[in-house]
Amino acid sequence: MGMSRTRIRSGLCAAFVAALLGTGVAGLLGCGGGPQPLQGVEVRAYEGQDLSSINDMRENSIQGPQAVDLSTYRLTITGLVEQPVSYAYADVIDDHQLYTKVVTLNCVEGWSVDILWEGVLVRDLLNEAKPTEDARIAIFKCVDGYTTSVDVAYLQGRDILLAYKMNGLVLPSERGFPFQLVAEDKWGYKWAKWIEEIELSSDIGYKGFWEEFGYSKDGSLSRPSFGN
Ligand SMILES: Nc1nc2c(c(=O)[nH]1)N[C@H]1C(S)=C(S)[C@@H](COP(=O)(O)O)O[C@H]1N2
Ligand SMILES: [Mo]
């Protein structure tokens, strides 16, 4: 009797999760345990600070919004690493400490947004892949063909997030689902969206998509965005 009730409940739970597949929230919901998130409402203030809205961001990505299928999606860490890794979406989120932080994204076009980001530390993922001593830069490769790079030292010396949520909601597909780099203190073009590969390289002359057009490789907000 008790057995069959349990079976019905877990069957319902599986059906519930199955119904959510494709919306980008499956995998975030465990069955049983803590509170289950319902359809989300965007957080607009955090510890007394007003936040921007997801809708304040402009969509000007090189190929428009990308639809990523989680059933085939992998995030890989490749190149100059001792241990190449390949994560499913849930591996990234479930197997690593999650952190939140309010960080401002500034686009060179003159707009900015203050957003509460949630994600894992890029450093924690790199530690699993073990970059070799020759690795100087990390190239972020995205589903839309976009690329950009940051120094390995920047990722290892600071708390840099790979975000899967913004303002409390799973990243919408136009905002980079499943993952966006929160490239704190760098111009928006360093904030790679729809990331599928992080390649470690020794090529300090490497230029990503906008860098090829003359934008700075370093991309620090404290320096001019154009030229190096
Ligand atoms: N994959 C990918 N990531 C990208 C871009 C892009 O075109 N493709 N544009 C960049 C630029 S120029 C900015 S300002 C930010 C903006 O993020 P948003 O479009 O979500 O506002 O994403 C960055 N990341
Ligand atoms: Mo931008």
Image (tube, grey):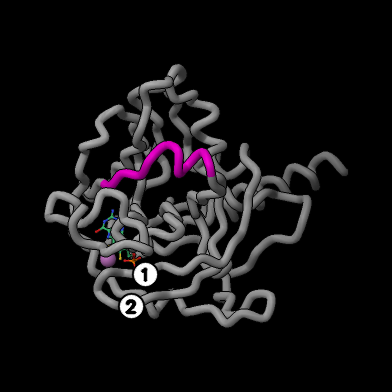
Distance from Cα at disc 2 to Cα at disc 1: 6 Å
Q: Is mark 1 within 8 Å of ligand 1?
A: yes
* Residue type, label 2: Trp
User: Which image quarter: residue 39?
Assistant: bottom right
Q: Secondary structure at mark 1?
A: strand
Q: Residues within 10 Å of mark 1 (few under 14, many from 20)?
A: some
Earlier sequence position, callout 2 versus callout 1 = 1
Q: Are marks 2 and 1 in contact (CB under 8 Å)?
A: yes
Judge whether residue 74 can be spotted in this image: yes
User: Does 201 sit left or right of 184 as displayed?
Assistant: left
Work out which residue is located at the far left of the displayed protein and give it.
Answer: 213
Relative vertical location of residue 114 with respect to residue 226 in this rendering, above or below: below
The image quadrant where one finds ligand 1 is: bottom left
Residue picked out by circle 2: 111
* Residue type, label 1: Asn
Residue picked out by circle 1: 106
Judge whether residue 1 can be spotted in this image: no
Tell me if residue 155 is in the magenta stretch: yes
Q: Is mark 2 within 8 Å of ligand 1?
A: no
Image point (36%, 75%), residue name? 57
Work out which residue is located at the far top of the displayed protein and give it.
Answer: 82
User: Which image quarter: residue 167?
Assistant: bottom right
The spot of residue 26 in percent (x, y) is 54, 52
Image point (54%, 29%), residue name? 127
Q: Give, as a single range, the part of the protein colored magenta.
A: 148-157
